[in-house]
Amino acid sequence: MDIFNQLLQGFITAATPINLLWCFVGCALGTAVGVLPGIGPAVAVAMLLPITVKVEATASMIFFAGIYYGAMYGGSTTSILLNTPGETASMVTAMEGNKMAKSGRAGAALATAAIGSFVAGTIATVLVTLFAPVVAEFAVKLGPPEYFMLMLLAFTTVSAVLGKSAVRGLTALFVGLAAGLVGLDQITGQARYTGGVPEMLDGIEIVLVAVGLFAVAEAMYAVLYEGRVVDSQNKLSRVHMTAKDWRRSWPAWLRGTAIGAPFGCIPAGGTEIPTFLSYATEKKLAKDNTEFGTQGAIEGVAGPEAANNATVTAAMIPLLTLGIPTSNTTAILLGAFQNYGIQPGPQLFTSSSALVWALIASLYIGNVMLLVLNLPLVGLWVKLLKIPKPYLYAGILIFATVGVYGMRQSAFDLFLLYGIGVLGVVMRRFDFPTAPVVVGMILGPLAEAQFRNAMSIGEGSAMVFLQRPMSVTLLVIVVAVLVLPRLFRAFRTPAAR
């Protein structure tokens, strides 16, 4: 009953005219960004971080949640019509959705994607409502040794799972940890790694790093390496589904949600695994799978799209309760929280209860808004595909530059922004994941503080981490994340390889 009352208070806060407006703008912007090929939610949130610095915290978080959700919804449009996924999450949708579009069934594909996203998002939001407070209540009982191990788990999961290579992921993490050390030492007050630059005494702004690594690097990479790609667009049919489409879609929506939600809850990172699993399940269960890969099967769009949105929504549980981001976008949302002096984690549900419940309530509201936006206005989103790429990326660079300069009016920040942008281009070129850099920067100083506190409790002995059951359990999980994938690869038969 207490959860219901808190959620009701959240709805009262989220339903104020200004917050509803921010939610609507976020959903519309997110959908528009999701529709544009190659521009994912991480880029959108990073680009708009500096713009909302002066906005009240609750409104800002609701705005970013709208972008986060909207971009996931919008990604299916470009995947189905152009076969150009804006995010890896939309790759599986493109496999069957684009074939449906070429067979003259683009409308049905877009409709099942939008409604499936709504169904999965709503169910996953209910899970967030019910389980996030329980996880937070348990986690609040942990001490410094457990917190340090929890952050170590965040480092390893984000680094080892998000990238194609664990070595590259850990390298990116150490870059972030090094950047997090810049500035004044938390205890001694000594300057560390500032190079004699006064602007570095306060540390490197996380907003600046997020904008440089995601928005600036995205634009520069597109200009340098992607060249002039001519996209061919399929004709858009009416956005509706036949009775047969409905019969085939609804079981796929529910199965996709059941597959996606657990992957969002655990800090395993990414939507690729649940979406591919959902696709494989639908292909296996289909009575007639001859449509798969030829004319396009509607289950192959409905299931993966539901799995994607269930994963994305359930990812709010580890973000809000443990402070562990499981994707690029949640890593930047973590930065947005910290920008307001709010640290996601077990204490968040007590220290910023009103904000958290308003955010959860806004997920329900945003879900309905997105369904209303997606079905009638899909024709408008399709027109966004005609924006020339040069104008699009020039706009991103202008937004990023003005936003970062507006934070401190410092020319040094602009040099740093574009230096980080170049680093982001190099990382993309050589397949280094960028999310571990942001996670390392945000959680690094916190992990350092918790490690020092834990060592004080243990009177200088590292055995303190092995004397507490929860700390040992987390340590075993960390080792498992790093070792088990390699053992599986080592023991596979030559035939399986």
Image: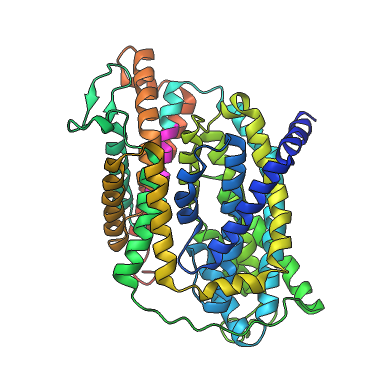
Q: Which quadrant of the figure contains the N terminus?
A: top right
Q: Position of residue 255 (x, y in %)?
A: 68, 61
Front residue of 17/217: it is: 17
On screen, 357 above or below 421?
Answer: above
Q: Residue at x 33, y 68 (%)?
A: 223
Residue 327 visible to an observer of this rendering:
no
Residue 450 visible to an observer of this rendering:
yes
Q: Position of residue 462 (x, y in %)?
A: 32, 21
- Report if residue 154 lies within the magenta region: yes
Front residue of 101/386: it is: 386
Q: Residue at x 43, y 61 (%)?
A: 395
Give the image quarter of residue 181: top left
Q: Which quadrant of the figure contains the C terminus?
A: bottom left
Residue at the limit of the structure toward the top, as seen here: 459
Front residue of 91/494: it is: 91
Q: Position of residue 245 (x, y in %)?
A: 75, 76
- Report if residue 155 lies within the magenta region: yes
Report the span colored magenta. Answer: 150-160
Q: Residue at x 68, y 37 (%)?
A: 358
Is 392 displayed left or right of 90 in the figure? left
On screen, 101 above or below 490?
Answer: below
Front residue of 92/482: it is: 92
Magenta span: predominant SS is: helix
